[in-house]
Image (cartoon, rainbow, N blue to C red):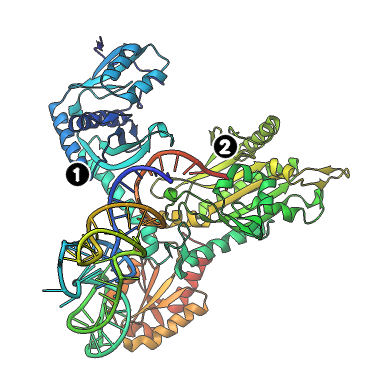
Amino acid sequence: MANEVKRDLALEEGEYDCPPEPLPTLRHSASHVMAQAVKEIFPEARLAIGPSIEDGFYYDFQLSRPFTPEDLDRIEARMREIIQADHPFVRMEMSRAEAIAFFEKGNEPFKVEILRDLQVDVVSLYRQGDFIDLCRGPHVPSTGQIRAFKLLSIAGAYWRGDERRPMLQRIYGTAWHTEEELSQYLWRVEEAKKRDHRRLGRQLDLFAFHDVAPGAPFWLPKGMVLVRELERFWREVHDTRGYEEISTPILVSKKVWEQSGHWDHFRESMFRLEVEEQEFSLKPMNCPESTFVYRHRLRSYRDLPLRLSEIGRLHRFERSGTLAGLFRVRQITMDDAHIYCRPDQIQAEITGVLEIVKTFYALFGMTPRFYLATRPAKAMGDRALWDHAEHALREALRANDLAYEIKEGDGAFYGPKIDIHIEDALGRDWQTATIQLDYQMPERFELEYVDADGQAKRPVMIHRAIFGSFERFIGILTEHFAGAFPAWLAPVQARVLPVSEKVHDYARTVHGRLKSAGVRAELDDRNEKLGYKIREAQVEKVPYMLVVGEREARDGAVAVRRRSGEDLGPVPLERFVADLQVEIGGRAR
RNA sequence: GCCGGCGUAGCUCAGAGGCUAGAGCAGCCGAUUCGUAAUCGGCAGGUCGUCGGUUCGACUCCGACCGCCGGCUCCA
């Protein structure tokens, strides 16, 4: 019934199952081989889909019992046999009806479902050995082409990504052209694990999580230094840019959320409680309450733009399975601000925010990428306003000469937004900053200003965050710097290491001098050898180790060692203090 | 929330239906007074995540719950 096709058709855009480049093709083929191995070992397994993904591939199966790590070993061994046999990948074509019949006979309900949804008359299948799978290709010529691969993990995944549909078992694997690339990749994964902020957070005593507060960190003294330094910098920037800081209540009546519209959209994601027969909630956002500050006075067009900033502590009920260290928390400390302005000020205000974004990320050596997120399906407000808002954002981006991509339908329910992503030291992508234009909240809360003509007008509201949240951003920073924070952020900036007890008096003098100069300095006067103290300071990634022995005591100097291992030799104490103050004051990287 | 895995000392980990559950590091005490990544000796440290069940006996087996990890879903 099937026609074998001698050569791959010239595939066009949209006609393949994986990008027709060498590596995705290889990985896609590896997933077919994995499916074959699984079917041979577990004939009762049902096949779902198996694409190539970044760094590897997966295949989803339905099987009554869970896969175990031992199963992975067996599957991998079987795959090697299939690869050894060097079966050619053969493309075949048949009518959709024939294919449905074929997979019904093979008892593959997921394949049948895919085929029923397809709009085409003829479908392609690929065969290697006696294993046939529905697939648009392309594939490598034969299984022997797959050399460097490894199965990695087993995970659950909903059929078609829909939580109402069956939960399948997904096996993840990775595949590369050469063994070298494979081991390089595995090494990269190991390195990433070493940088994991959860691990570094524990090792460096930055923060801790406890069962009693899932999704909310306990900041330890050293981690709190990071929070404070970021706050300090953040306030400096906003103070000089005409922002006024406010703070609004955390526990508020549901009336506020009903008025803002959040109650309808996000009630289920709010922490609610009843007090004296009134329903309250922990605030999941700052914006509705910010409007109370706006309305505190009658506003004139001369008052605008009014920029109200707030480091607000929010709570959002994130489902238990989604929590992850500082990256996904239930208690979020947002570096928020709301700008109330006239329509003619929008572009200038957005421009100002974009400038802050650039300043911030340059400081950390991160390159921001900009995305415009447009009208979502369940949007509030009329179409024309949305179009106008999207246009204003586009214009601001263009005026700032910023390249951007579109995230279609990804806007907030009250307005479109510019999302800013950064790439960290490991090349991973994070969404951090966001700038959201909002005509809805002013409407809902009936905000007004008196214009030059004496008429009451409605202001526009811009929501924006630069870090996103302190929790998440500190998580990203920790991994970005692998715990070796620049001196201005480092919890301990310098540690004094006396060589022996004989110089403890001098070491105390040095330590005292550093403290009086405002340096976060520690004195390690424990009864240990120098090598031990250095090792420990090194592990803790203290930027400067100041070795003091009898020579330094005599000369009023410190022997400076950087955490890079670089030994700067003896430096007069006052010189070191002055240099360090410059480095910290300039927030040098 | 769902699928799977895990939970033993502050940390990293070993152990096991049957006598007082171990190690390294960290901590404390003592010795050593030392020059750029771990000095030596001693001491102390545990309701084996919680609750319930099976059993003569449970840290070990079973169940529920809590938390964490890998994913999926979600993310104003």
Q: Nearer the viewer, residue A547 or A194?
A: A194
* Position of residue A283 measured from the top left corner of the image (x, y, whole percent): 61, 54
Q: Is residue A296 visible?
A: yes
Q: Amino acid at mark 1?
A: Glu
Is the same chain shared between marks 2 and 1?
A: yes
**Residue at coordinates 38% horizontally, 32% vertically from top-left?**
A159
Query: What label does residue A372 carry, if any?
Result: 2
Q: Nearer the viewer, residue A589 or A410?
A: A410
* Position of residue A112 measured from the top left corner of the image (x, y, whole percent): 34, 21
Q: Please give left or right for residue A352 compared with residue A1 in the image.
A: right
In space, the residues marked 2 and 1 are separated at their CA atoms by 46 Å
Q: Residues within 10 Å of mark 1 (few under 14, many from 20)?
A: few
Q: Please give left or right for residue A480 compared with residue A439 in the image.
A: left
Q: Secondary structure at mark 1?
A: helix
Q: Chain of mark 2?
A: A
Q: Nearer the viewer, residue A148 or A39?
A: A39
Q: Nearer the viewer, residue A436 or A64?
A: A64
Q: Is residue A567 visible?
A: no
Q: Earlier in the sequence, mark 2 or mark 1?
A: 1
Q: Amino acid at mark 2?
A: Leu
Q: Which residue is mark 1?
A: A70
Task: Name the image quarter holding residue A406.
Answer: top right
Q: Secondary structure at mark 2?
A: strand
**Residue at coordinates 30% horizontally, 48% vertically from top-left?**
A189
